């Protein structure tokens, strides 16, 4: 028997049991109702119960959002939700507390640490429950899932424990001032063929046999909100034996319902994101190709840290799954992806849910609103502030509208902010009178839009090139520049070159070109120079640059870094002969390649294997002039045959080390003084390499770059400017 039919049979049994008990044992009035039926009452109830279950499953048990080609069963992708308790959603934090809490978090999420509770357990415990959250947080999905759980009956372990018939009512459908909940319930019973649905509804309500799911209090038109709240309150008071779960966007809620326990939807944590992805990709083909795991693994990559931030919101996680489903990857130009995410929040989600938009949007176009939000995002990001007061953002809205000739002047800043917070959730109230963007990723994207719109790329480069906080903004600026990112890349190159301004740094870069100039390998000249610089300093920034230039090169250099982590070298020098700290990793690598010393982390055999693997792989890459590398390997092997036992006196080991260093530096034609850098020189080299790493990533993220421009930049990468 198909799962769907099994569900319908179980649901019909639950509904039929409740109706039979309430309607057929309800006294003389209902006894006469039973007698009036031409068919057997039990058959009538059973048939209607089955039809009701089918109707609920068809209308509320399927999910189709954001342009999905086919609907999917809600239960196939549903991920158990968690709630924040009332104390955790209270708004008493200061801006300073929020800034501090955010910057101390290991990831980029705004939601602070708080006690979390299982959603189903809370729904079992609370007779009256108000579920709060932002747009796309999963409120409606949770209500629908609770209805499905109730239909399964209370015999299932870890399920919904109360025997109730669920009725889901979308409050947006009440267009008039009358919120006729009882009539809406009766209509649900009328559709499935229950005779005298009004009488049946009243009897079920009086018996407390319904789970009434009131979805979208915030979707009631603003002018009817006060009246709607009062009517719902009256209905709950009249039929208070029943169970109620309501939903509302957090920004629209004003603690209106005194009987209800308030909880807020918690963001998905990492495990929930992973579970959702694996539930999403369940087709036979996806299982064969391991699509879910590939999607999850990609989100774990460092370059997708900002993308993963979006995944903690169910709606935007759905968008990410749809994007991955279409292309089996995420776009390198993430500006396209983030632009689509913003578009979902600005208009698509409200449109799909048929929510009546606030009247202010009749005058404030989406295009104008996006420009306004971009200005707010950039202003606060420039000030290194992720949180801002209500007064500040209202003043910015007022100023924007006043200074724009084509903007509506009659709109009130307070009303505009409230509409954005409630209907779109792009700006979120994090504490009392304190706001932020819903996702740091969206703030960065909007800030990038503002920079491009106002031609601020030169200022961006001059002031923030080496500030890692601006990394994602740089990548997004490159991605939104539809006219081409050439000017941005050239400005980044010029700014990066200003850090190479000492004789040692210039000599070091000159050497990378000289030692790789005639190399025959297939690596690009820039990748070869990066290899040389890494071998000179065993520098993590050079390794990062190798990763974006050529992943195969990076995997080889990773072996060298592992070898260089043999830290015994640091204590091998008397104080009067200690090399500059910048040179220690290089000398450690030289000794490791010569001696294959075992450490606590690796035995002798493994160390020798790792050494051979590294030298073999490096030779295959042909990054150096052929004779240089061959001669280095040959001389190291000779030294290895003469290497003293590690139990020899320190002076013997030091003399051997000196021979190794002399061989290493002379064969590579590397003056050891060039890598004995001061703290300031190390800082400048670090900034230079970071800037070039970001430059390459911006090129990869850009929608358009001239081949001629990039060829010139690549030819000059890690070379002394003339």
Image: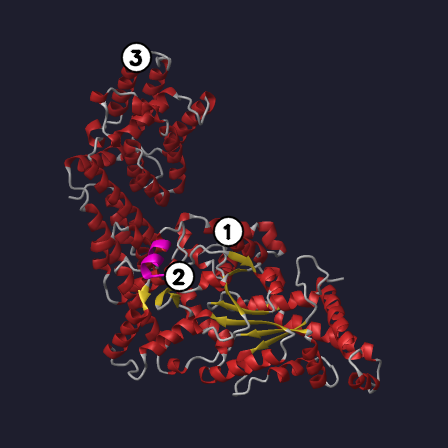
- Residue 152 at x, y = what percent? 70, 65
**Does residue 480 show up magenta in the picture?**
no
Badge 1 crowding class, 10 Å Cα cut-off, few under 14, some 14 to 19, many 20 or more, is some
Whole-percent x and y of residue 185?
A: 64, 80
> Of label 1 and label 2, which has the lower sequence position?
1
Q: Where 112 sits versus 433, above or below?
A: above
Quadrant in which the C terminus is drawn: top left
In three-dimensional space, the C-alpha distance between marks 1 and 2, rounded to whole angstroms, equals: 20 Å
Q: CA distance from mark 2 to mark 3?
A: 60 Å
10 Å neighbourhood of mark 2: few (<14), some, or many (≥20)? many
- Give the side of residue 492 with respect to residue 591, left or right: left
Q: Nearer the viewer, residue 693 or 716?
A: 693
| SS class, disc 2 | loop
Q: Residue at point 26% right, 48% down?
A: 691
Graded by Cα atoms within 10 Å as few (under 14), some (14 to 19) or many (20 or more), the crowding at tag 3 reads some
Question: What's the magenta bit mostly, secondary-structure-wise?
Answer: helix
Q: Residues in magenta? A: 92-101
513 above or below 198? Answer: above
Look at mark 1 in the image and give the residue it sits on.
Answer: 296
Q: Nearer the viewer, mark 1 or mark 2?
A: 2
Q: Earlier in the sequence, mark 2 or mark 3?
A: 2
Is residue 684 something that shows in the picture? yes
From the viewer's side, name the closer residue of 577 and 485: 577
Residue occupying image coordinates x 37% and y 43%: 547
Residue appearing at x 38%, y 63% in the figure: 92
Q: CA distance from mark 3 to mark 1?
A: 53 Å
* Left or right side of 286 for 657: left
Residue that badge 3 annotates: 652
Q: Which mark is residue 439?
A: 2
């Amino acid at each position: 028997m198909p799962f769907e039919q099994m569900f319908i049979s179980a649901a019909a049994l639950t509904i039929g049991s409740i109706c039979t008990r309430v309607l057929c044992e309800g006294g003389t009035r209902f006894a006469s109702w039973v007698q009036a039926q031409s068919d057997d009452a039990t058959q009538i109830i059973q048939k209607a119960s089955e039809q009701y279950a089918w109707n609920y499953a068809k209308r509320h048990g399927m999910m189709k959002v954001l342009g999905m080609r086919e609907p999917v069963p809600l239960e196939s992708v549903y991920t158990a939700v968690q709630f924040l308790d009332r104390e955790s959603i209270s708004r008493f934090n200061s801006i300073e507390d929020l800034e501090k809490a955010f910057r101390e978090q290991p990831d980029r999420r705004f939601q602070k640490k708080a006690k979390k509770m299982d959603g189903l357990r809370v729904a079992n415990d609370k007779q009256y429950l108000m579920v709060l959250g932002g747009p796309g947080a999963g409120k409606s999905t949770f209500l629908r899932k609770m209805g499905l759980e109730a239909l399964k009956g209370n015999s299932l372990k870890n399920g919904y424990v109360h025997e109730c018939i669920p009725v889901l009512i979308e409050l947006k459908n009440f267009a008039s001032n009358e919120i006729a909940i009882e009539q809406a319930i009766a209509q649900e019973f009328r559709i499935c063929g229950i005779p005298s649905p009004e009488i049946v509804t009243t009897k079920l309500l009086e018996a407390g046999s319904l789970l009434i799911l009131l979805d979208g209090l915030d979707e009631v038109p603003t002018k009817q909100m006060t009246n709607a709240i009062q009517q719902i309150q009256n209905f709950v008071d009249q039929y208070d034996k029943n169970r109620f779960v309501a939903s509302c966007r957090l920004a629209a809620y004003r603690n209106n319902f005194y009987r209800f326990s308030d909880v807020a939807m918690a963001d998905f944590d990492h495990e929930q994101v992973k579970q959702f992805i694996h539930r999403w990709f369940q087709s036979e083909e996806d299982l064969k190709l391991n699509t879910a795991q590939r999607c999850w693994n990609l989100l774990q990559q460092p370059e997708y840290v900002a993308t993963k931030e979006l995944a903690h919101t169910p709606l935007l996680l759905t968008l990410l799954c749809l994007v991955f489903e279409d292309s089996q990857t995420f776009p390198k130009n993430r500006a396209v992806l983030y632009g689509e995410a913003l578009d979902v929040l600005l208009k698509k989600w409200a449109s799909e849910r048929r929510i009546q938009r606030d009247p202010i949007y009749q005058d404030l176009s989406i295009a104008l609103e996006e420009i306004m939000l971009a200005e707010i995002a950039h202003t606060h990001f420039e000030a290194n502030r992720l949180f801002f007061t209500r007064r500040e953002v209202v003043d910015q809205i007022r100023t924007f509208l006043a200074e724009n000739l084509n903007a509506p002047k009659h709109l009130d800043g307070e009303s505009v902010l409230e509409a954005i917070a409630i209907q779109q959730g792009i700006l979120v109230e994090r504490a009392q009178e304190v706001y932020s963007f819903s996702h740091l990723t969206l703030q960065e994207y909007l800030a990038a839009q503002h920079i491009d719109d106002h031609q601020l790329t030169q200022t961006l480069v001059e002031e923030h090139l080496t500030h890692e906080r601006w990394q994602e903004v740089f990548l997004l600026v490159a991605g939104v520049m539809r006219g081409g990112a050439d000017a941005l890349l050239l400005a980044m190159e010029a700014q990066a070159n200003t850090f190479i301004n000492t004789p040692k740094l210039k000599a070091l870069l000159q050497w990378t070109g000289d030692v790789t100039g005639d190399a025959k390998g297939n690596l690009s000249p820039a990748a070869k120079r990066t290899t040389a610089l890494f071998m000179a300093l065993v520098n993590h920034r050079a390794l990062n640059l190798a990763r974006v230039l050529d992943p195969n090169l990076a995997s080889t250099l990773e072996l060298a870094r592992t070898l260089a982590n043999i830290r015994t070298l640091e204590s091998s020098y008397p104080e009067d002969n200690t090399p500059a700290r910048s040179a220690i990793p290089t000398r450690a690598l030289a000794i490791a390649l010569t001696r294959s010393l075992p450490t606590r982390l690796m035995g002798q055999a493994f160390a020798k294997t790792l050494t051979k693997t590294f030298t073999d792989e490096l030779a295959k890459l042909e990054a150096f002039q052929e004779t240089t590398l061959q001669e280095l390997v040959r001389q190291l092997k000779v030294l290895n045959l003469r290497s003293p036992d590690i139990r020899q006196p320190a002076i013997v080991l030091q003399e051997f080390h000196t021979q190794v260093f002399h061989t290493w530096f002379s064969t590579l034609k590397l003056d050891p003084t060039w890598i004995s850098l001061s703290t300031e020189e190390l800082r400048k080299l670090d900034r230079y390499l970071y800037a070039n790493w970001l430059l390459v990533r911006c090129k990869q993220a850009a929608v358009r770059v001239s081949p001629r421009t990039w060829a010139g930049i690549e030819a000059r990468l890690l070379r002394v400017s003339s």
